[in-house]
Image (cartoon, rainbow, N blue to C red):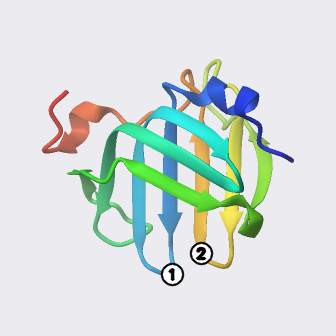
Amino acid sequence: MRLTNDLLCGFVGGQMEIQNSNENYIFRGEIKTIAVVGENLVAKFAWLAKGKGDLPMIEGWVKDDDLDYSINLGICSVNNIGSSDGEIGGGDRICITSPIVGEIIVLYPPNGSKLDPAKVEGLVL
């Protein structure tokens, strides 16, 4: 699957989850902008949260101030993984994996699964 800016614009207002079990981190945030720029996927978050605790047992979420994200798509594979069970009108999700950096990135559409920002410690909207 090839990512295009036309496809990605449908995820603005949705959320992105970035996790790495090798380095034991997970982030989730609302997508403000997202685009393919050259060989990179570049995103800016409206807000971002980092999971507290060890994967896979997250104990909660805390505000993170690094609202910019970028990954070279040349080291990634991209797949449409459909909507998850239980999502009403959830739309399709996109999964981007990079074994080289150990990240799994999931893009959720605006009407898909969401982390409630009210549950993020330190986040004021």
Which quarter of the picture shows residue 35? top right
Which residue is farthest front?
38
Q: Nearer the viewer, residue 40 or 30?
A: 40
> Where 85 sits versus 111, above or below?
below
Regarding mark 1 in the picture, which secondary structure is present there?
A: loop
In the image, taking residue 9 as reference, residue 24 lies left or right, namely left
In the rendered image, residue 26, in percent from the top left (x then y), is placed at 42, 61
Q: Are marks 1 and 2 in contact (CB under 8 Å)?
A: yes
In the rendered image, residue 32, in percent from the top left (x then y), is placed at 44, 31
- Residue that appears at 70% across and 43% down: 94
User: Which numbered disc, 1 or 2, marks the residue that appears first in the sequence?
Assistant: 1
Regarding mark 2 in the picture, which secondary structure is present there?
A: loop
Q: Which residue is mark 2?
A: 102
- Residue that appears at 44% across and 41% down: 44
Q: Which mark is residue 53?
A: none
Residue type, label 1: Asn
In the image, taking residue 106 as reference, residue 23 lies left or right, namely left
**How would you rate the neighbour count of disc 2 (Cα within 10 Å): few for under 14, some for 14-19, many for 20 or more?**
few
In the rendered image, residue 96, in percent from the top left (x then y), is placed at 69, 55
